[in-house]
Image: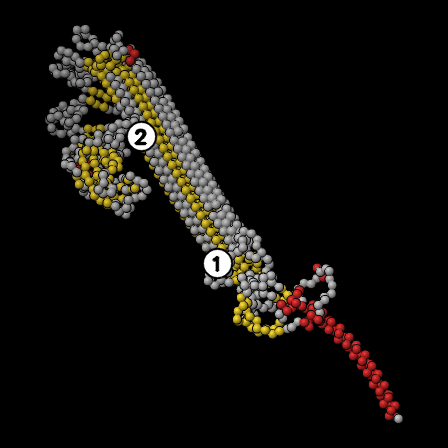
Amino acid sequence: MIFFALCPEPCALSQIPQGFNYQAIVRDGVTKQPIISQSIMVRITIETSLAAEVYQEEHALSTDEFGIMAIVIGEGTPTGTDLFEDIDWNEEPLFIKTELQYPVGGSYTEMGTAPLMSVPYAMVADSLSRPLTKLTVKGETTDMEEALFEVRNKDGQIIFAVYNEGVRAYVSDGDAKGVKGGFAIGGFGADKQGVQKYFFVSGDSIRAYIDSTSTKAVKGGFAIGGFENTKAPGQEYLRVTRDSVRIYLDANPETKSVKGGFAIGGFEKSKGNESFFNVAIDTSGKIDPSENRILWYPLKNAFRTGKVLIEKKDSVGENSFASGFESKAIGKYSQALGYQAIARNNYSTAIGYQAIAHKINSFAFGQWAAAKNEESYAFGRGAIAEGFRSYAFGSAGVDTAGVSTDVTYAIGDYSFAIGQGSQSKGIGAFAIGIADTAVGDFSVALGYKSNAKSFGSVAIGFMASASGWFSTAVGELTMASGDGSIAMGYETTASGTNSTAMGDGTIASGYKSTALGFFTEANGHISTAMGYFTTASGSYSTAMGMYSKAIGEGSTAMGRAAKASGKYSTAIGLSTTASEEYSVAMGETTTANGKSSTSMGRLTTASGDISIAMGEGTMSSGYISTAMGSATMANGNISTAMGESTIAPSCYEISIGVFNTTYEPSSATEWIASDRLFVIGNGTDDASRSNALTVLKNGHIGLQSVETPTYALELPNNSDIGIGQARAYAWATYSDGRAKSDQSNLLYGLAEVMRMVPKTYFHHITNSGNEEIEIEDSGTYDIGLIAQEVYEIIPEAVYKPENEEKDLWSISYEKLTPVLINAIQEQQAQIESQNKENQQLKSELETLKERMAAVEAMLGKD
């Protein structure tokens, strides 16, 4: 289907063209979008109210970039023998029918028929060039001294003028001897007697003069008195003085004319007499068949004029008045005027063609007008006021073919129906416009074919419909069917109770829902949809912006193409999605799939329950996981990934930095000691990932390339200076005796030390922790002990791996310190013991020396 919006343009006044402009917007009947830059065929038909064709033409054209087509009616290609210039524009009413062919080559589709509300200027201007058969002048001036219409003589003097308050005529006092002017109150001629006055109005009197000279012709059509040239005074017919009004009648019994108590007629010397006004006492009180009469009806103190019909005494109301063709004023103090008008009840009034006022104080005015209830008022053609104290003002409707349809009808008590074909059926209802209907009690319908169907409903505009209690529909093709609902704009629908739909094509079907904007839908209870093609289908949901959808209960979608489908979810921004309950998605193309998850930034995804993804390209799939930064991933439960391209795949894992290494965890949902706990990445790109620090859940710490440390602290084994080495000003190890029980002296000592074999060797670079130990050819010369050899002497100082295929033997050199102390102490004891022996030997030697010296001395003497 294709819709038209008629936009006629005014014609230029500098010439009289044979045609008038016609513009319209061509829209697709489904999408309501304009049909842009497309070829179409348009057929225009001028026809009568009975659909008789007067003229028809076709136009081949294309719509412009806005879907607008523009033609000049009268410049198309005629389809028949009728010509545009031959149209009789005075023939009323004329209608214009529009048909459209789209696509071209198909059949014509009728778009509608509308009356020509006024004759086009060009046609009227052209008709003024010919003799006029009728001319109507309507004044707009408020100056009472300014003429609405004037006729002046050749000297510019006014002869005839029409003013707001009346008509004035002036007759010249010239030398012409003939009758002056075409209209004269007084006569004047060229003789010496001067002007003869026939009718004179002055400030103090009104006087009429009739020529009563003895002629055989009938004297005047109306005479107040007569005057003649005899000395006797003239015959008085009517005298008005300060104290009385007197009428003189011919009471001669020999006169054959009609006798009455009061009669006004003409009299002459010929036979017969015509009675124009008659007051008589007629005991029958009947005039049937009807007669042309001016009648005073003394039986009821009533007055009748025109074609009088009195079928029985009861058909004349006391102190009533009836005038026209067979009109009847039956009720007391009633009035009936027109053609067969009837005022049936007391104080009623009927005026027009077959107008009827049925009840007390009713009033019917117009053709077929009927006031059927007490104090009801019907004005217009076919208007009916049926309700008590109702009002019907207007005329019968006419369809596109000129056929009469519904009449203006006020059915409800205290109701008002105003306009063509409008009907007010409810109590206190108002229907104002063309073909409007107010059905509900206290309802209001205004505009064109608007319908207020329920109690207290209001429908205003073009074919608006308000069917719910206290509902309101305003605009074009709006519909408010829910109780307390409001629909405003173009083709809006408010079907939910207390719902509101405003804008273009909006729908509010949910309880207390609100739809505002362009083709928005609020289907859920207490939902709100605002903007452009937004949808709020969940209860308590809100959708705002463009193409946004709030589907879940209590959900909110704001922005462009935002979608909140989970319960109490929120999606804000561009193409954001919050699909699970309590989830939040904000930014650009963010997704929150997990329950109570939050996704913020750009291209972020929070799929784990209670997870958070923030930044750009981040993903949090684990339960209560958090991914922040750029391209980070938190896959493990309660994991955290922060920085750039960091990954936290295991449960409770925290990864920070940039481009940390990837691995396959033992579990993403459970605590596994061998999985990572904390990682600091220091890679440069996805192909060059590395860690600065790796901490496992078992407490082992690996530095740099050591990603699976088997010791509490493991450094990489490398020949480079500084790699695998630690440096500190002081490195203390606690050794509190309070934390040590079952103390005993160490048994290891000098003997074990003496068994150790320190060596120098070439130390190969090794990689352990994998399936097997990898020993490289590279390395460096070093000194130390061999773990396997020391294990045979002091096993407590050696770490023996459970799986020698995967891990290396290692020595805790710090545990050799107590052994060395013991060895030193043992050696010191030996030294001290030897010192004592040496001292004793020295003392003995000294004694021996002394003895030998004494011996030598003794020998020397000898």
Q: Is residue 196 visible?
A: yes
Q: CA distance from mark 2 to mark 1?
A: 71 Å
- Going from N to C along the chain, the mark reached first, 2 or 1, is 2
Quadrant occupied by the C terminus: bottom right
* Image position of 686 with respect to 105: above or below: below
* Image position of 351 with respect to 313: above or below: below
Question: Which callout, 2 or 1, points to the residue nearer the camera?
Answer: 1
Give the image location of residue 56, x and y in percent: 19, 37
Give the image location of residue 407, x and y in percent: 30, 26
Res 315 quadrant in image: top left
Res 760 quadrant in image: bottom right
The residue identified by callout 1 is 645
Amino acid beneath label 1? Ser
Quadrant occupied by the N terminus: top left
Q: Is residue 150 visible?
A: no
Amino acid beneath label 2? Ala
842 displayed left or right of 571: right
Which residue corresponds to the image point at 23% horizontal and 40% vertical from the top-left? 106
* Image position of 364 with respect to 776: above or below: above
Which residue corresponds to the image point at 88% horizontal and 93% vertical from the top-left? 861
Give the image location of residue 453, x and y in percent: 37, 29
835 displayed left or right of 773: right
Res 548 quadrant in image: top left
The residue identified by callout 2 is 435
How crowded pointer 2 is (Cα within 10 Å; few <14, some 14-19, many 20+) is rated as: many
Q: Secondary structure at mark 2?
A: loop
Give the image location of residue 463, x and y in percent: 33, 34
